[in-house]
Amino acid sequence: MNAAGERMLTRWLLAGVLLAGLGLLWLLAGGDRRVHWSPPGPLPPMLAQAASVPAAAVPALSRFSAIWQRPLLNPDRQPLQPRGEGRRLGDLELTGVIISPGLKLALLRPRPGSGPAGAASAAGGLRVALGARTPDGGWQLTRLEPRQAWFSRDGRQLRLALMPAAAASVATRPAMSSSPAGPDEALEQQRREALRQALQRLRAQPPAASAASGTHS
């Protein structure tokens, strides 16, 4: 760098130092007193009213209990039971009623084909006393008659009627047979049933009536 360039650089450095010094003196002398933040202006009337309105209270969860207690997508409107915590009452059928002065019971069992819970054991019956609840604690036996029982749960009622013996035998017969009965087997079963009914009528006939018929002959 030649002497002329050095002199030019020195002048620029001196000018920069002079400007920095002048700026520092201006700040120290209070040159920024007129620089300040303006306070926020008042809110519009509508925004002020909205800010003063209290937040809406969250409704209690119990108000929506009907959503899970009576689900719309279930045909029987009963909530699904977790696996291993019991059966729905719609999967059970009434098989017997015991009414005595000191004991009142409803005998239940799983319906045929009600699922793995019903097929797990053939003796998977339940005994529910009058006023007691099912093992899962859901349904309560509130009324008992010789051929039907009433259960209640959360204000709902369900009636189970005693299945007739003939219907019960027909319902359980397909599960016992491994193959459908053919025409010959069906005729043989009808003959056996007719013979059994005839024997029952003969046994139920009073002896006096049979003796009287013998004397007239």
Image (tube, rainbow, N blue to C red):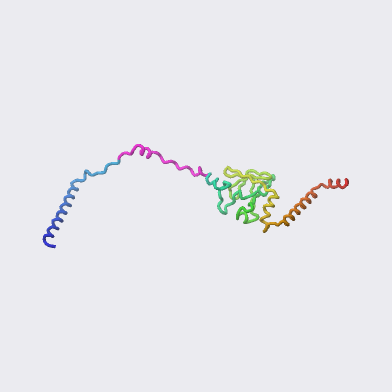
- Left or right, 46 with respect to 28, comes to right
- Residue pictured at 86% horizontal, 46% vertical: 213
Q: Residue 31: percent from the left, percent from the top?
A: 19, 46
In this picture, residue 40 sits left or right of residue 59: left
> Looking at the image, which residue sits at the far top?
45
- Residue 156, x across and y down, in percent: 59, 43
In this image, 76 relative to 4: left or right?
right
Q: Quadrant of the N terminus?
A: bottom left
Q: Nearer the viewer, residue 158 or 112?
A: 112
Q: Position of residue 42 (x, y in %)?
A: 31, 38
Q: Quadrant of residue 40?
A: top left
Residue bounds of the magenta highlight: 41-65
Q: Quadrant of residue 188?
A: bottom right
Among all residues in the image, which is located at the extreme front?
183
Q: How many marks?
A: 0
* Along the line of sight, the residue nearer the viewer: 201 or 151: 201
Where 173 falls versus 151 (above or below)?
below
Q: Residue at x 57, y 52 (%)?
A: 85
- Horizontal and vertical percent position of residue 10: 13, 57
User: Is residue 135 one of those drawn in magenta?
Assistant: no
Of all residues, the one furthest to the left in this rendering is: 3
